[in-house]
Image (cartoon, rainbow, N blue to C red):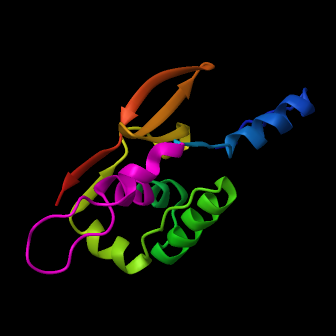
């Protein structure tokens, strides 16, 4: 079977389309620091340092970019460094341990995710279609 060839007639628009294909906007609220750390629990044993929001955020970025845990830690550190957000980043061992209790399911295909929003209300993954945000999908993280 012979594959049809697509003839490009508008090279500048085609080039811009290819560049936009790799575009992702990451929205992080400056007030996220108050929700980043785990509330202390009066239980025996080691206490959790990072909230579920912090772990979910890291795991969603890991899934979108297909990153190993160590690179996820470095990626988040570099983002926070560039944005001058002064919060500690979970190390890869913490991400590994806490990811066992969470399953991150993105309700949209990774190829059409355009924005990731992290604010005081939680973590949201935005999908844009036809120039508008077609739907906003809550990152579905379930225990187990």
- Say left or right for 10 vs 68: right
**Could you tell me residue 39's position as x and y percent?**
24, 58
- Specify the segment rendered in magenta: 30-59
Q: Nearer the viewer, residue 40 or 113?
A: 40
x 55%, y 27%: residue: 128
- Say left or right for 24 vs 95: right
x 55%, y 61%: residue: 86
**Could you tell me residue 9's position as x and y percent?**
90, 27
Q: In this view, does 96 lie above or below 78?
A: below
40 magenta-colored = yes
x 41%, y 38%: residue: 124
Q: In this view, does 85 lie above or below 25?
A: below
- Say left or right for 60 vs 5: left
- The image quadrant that residue 12 belongs to is top right
**Could you tell me residue 18's position as x and y percent?**
76, 41
- The image quadrant that residue 82 belongs to is bottom right
x 49%, y 56%: residue: 61
């Amino acid at each position: 079977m012979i594959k049809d060839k697509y003839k490009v007639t508008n090279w500048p628009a085609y080039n811009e389309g290819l560049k936009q294909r790799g575009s992702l906007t990451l929205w992080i609220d400056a007030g996220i620091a108050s929700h980043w750390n785990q509330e202390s629990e009066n239980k025996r044993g080691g206490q959790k340092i990072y909230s579920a929001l912090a772990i979910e955020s890291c795991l969603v970025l890991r899934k979108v970019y297909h990153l190993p845990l160590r690179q996820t830690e470095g990626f988040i550190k570099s983002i926070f460094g560039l944005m001058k957000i002064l919060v500690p980043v979970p190390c890869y061992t913490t991400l590994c341990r806490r990811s066992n209790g969470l399953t991150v399911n993105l309700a949209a295909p990774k190829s059409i995710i355009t924005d990731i929003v992290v604010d005081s209300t939680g973590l949201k993954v935005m999908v844009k279609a036809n120039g508008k945000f077609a739907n906003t999908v809550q990152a579905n993280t379930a225990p187990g």
